[in-house]
Amino acid sequence: MENEKSKVCAAIEREDAALRDISINIWDHPELCYDEHHAHQVLTTYLQAKGFSVEGQFKLPTAFRATTQSKDFTDDAPTIGVMCEYDALPGIGHACGHNLIAILGLAIACGIKDVMDSGDLKGKMIVLGCPAEEGGGGKVKLIHTGAYEDMDIAMMAHPSQFNLPKPIYVANSPVTVNFKGKASHASSFPWNGINALDAAVLCYQSVACMRQQFRPTWRVHGIFTKAGVKPNIIPDEAELLFYCRAPNSKELTELQRKMVGLFEGAAVATGCKVNYCFDPLSYDSLMSSEKLASLYVANGEELGIKFENDPLLLGKQGGSTDMGNVSRVLPSIHPKYSLNTDISAHTKEFCDIASDEIDDSEDDRDYDNDLEDESDLLGDVPDRESDPAAVEIDQDPQDPYNAVTEVEFDDQADSDMDSDVDENGESQWVKNVNHFPPIPLFTGQPGIKAAIPDDPSPIDIYNLFITDELIAEWKTETNVMQEQSSTLKTCSCFQIEADSKNGSQ
């Protein structure tokens, strides 16, 4: 195997200049989620030129799939999936380094293909171009359209300040909160108005007050997306967008329950109506494969990479990624590799670093490290049953608070909500996991079923199942704005209207 690893590393060295040019090209043309047409063209053109079988606009308008396999490939040989990301951030471009993630995927592809073509490795490799990681749930959509069903493992790596084989990525559920009031002249007739902005401000402040009761690993952060149009008009509409994060889906459900109370309370206090919707494309926490992580460390240390050993750093939680959802479907790894900087991602300074205009020795070694991992894996692929990371979803091995109780709704509070009875006399506010509407089982991918816990929480269901109608929309919709809009319309949400008894008083 050492001979194959050497050949893989030599193959990538030959592509070094071309890969750097591609990285700068993508960095120079930052594109937001589902609008990555330039990057899609650049990456697929390169892969086609290297002899891959390329499917452009695969499942989604800016996704792609490139495949290669050894001449002696059989169905019992391993199939390895490598992820490319290439979307940018609003306002600050490639401040998350997705241009580097993209060329890392290409590097792995070229190195492994070269050795496969020589007959030294047996297997199949799939390079999956994944759009819209920055909040668009690209991989979540790809999961539910069957893009991962013929892979045995999935892997990618992310640029960072640190070398971490198993970084902690937490579950994330975005929620949009919309308050409706009544407009009026703010000076002449303020008593005729109902101030939706006051409701939004009160909601935001309520979240701040509630943080004392949040678990140490919970994170909630938000922005105002609508806040009125002119100071002398009492705002009749205001809107916030929050990200709610927790280490696993069970705790995320508990956090959502607390947030709902804050939304309703702000509406009642100001006489407004409130609608809120938890995004069905929520991100699950990352469940790193122990075997893949061990291979990554072993090969990295051979190359001279020094991995972090500070317990505080190893236990520090980071952001969220849709690779977490992939890790619930098949064994996965999403390590972080150092760019020799102390600057964190999602900053203008990190964007400059991602332009590849610094010392790239760490990049080179990470290419080689991932390539050597691939070489090892073609001989021995972990499966869901044997992988130590393949545990029940709500028994997250990274969870420091394992004794989490089920979230229950108060019966008396539920019965008091007369306004929550629909036209059929059924309560819209139901208890426990059923407060999310039932969704039909997705049967297109057996691997998903294996990851479902016996007693799934609402966020498990949302992350793993989508209606057939929504899948059809994802496959056929070409207008991104319409696609995102129809996603929200198709999916049922948490929704309640709190009416003030005082009316417009």
Image (tube, helix red, strand yellow):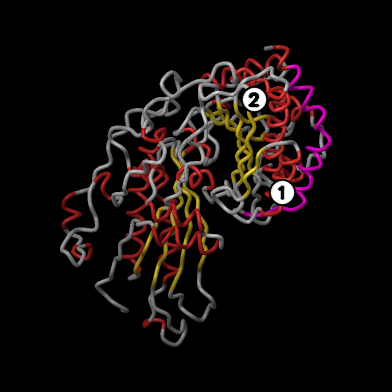
Q: Residue at x 69, y 19 (%)?
A: 119
Q: Indicate whether 490 appears above or below 165.
A: below
Q: Which residues are magenta?
A: 6-32
Q: Indicate whether 127 appears above or below 468.
A: above
Q: Residue at x 49, y 54 (%)?
A: 474
Identity, as a three-letter code, of the amino acid under mark 1: Lys
Q: Which residue is mark 2?
A: 70
Q: Secondary structure at mark 1?
A: helix
- Quadrant location, the C terminus: bottom left
Calculate the distance from the C-alpha at mark 2 to the C-alpha at mark 1: 42 Å
Q: Which residue is mark 1?
A: 348
Mark 2 and mark 1 in contact? Answer it, CB < 8 Å: no
Of badges 2 and 1, nearer the viewer stands 2
Q: Is residue 392 magenta?
A: no
Horizontal and vertical percent position of residue 83: 60, 37
- Horizontal side of residue 221 vs 468, given as left or right: right
Give the class, few, some or many, for how many residues have Cα within 10 Å of label 1's Cα (few <14, many ≥20): some
Horizontal and vertical percent position of residue 345: 66, 42
Q: Secondary structure at mark 2?
A: loop
- Horizontal side of residue 203 vs 439, given as left or right: right
Q: Residue at x 42, y 45 (%)?
A: 211
Q: Indicate whether 458 appears above or below 428.
A: above
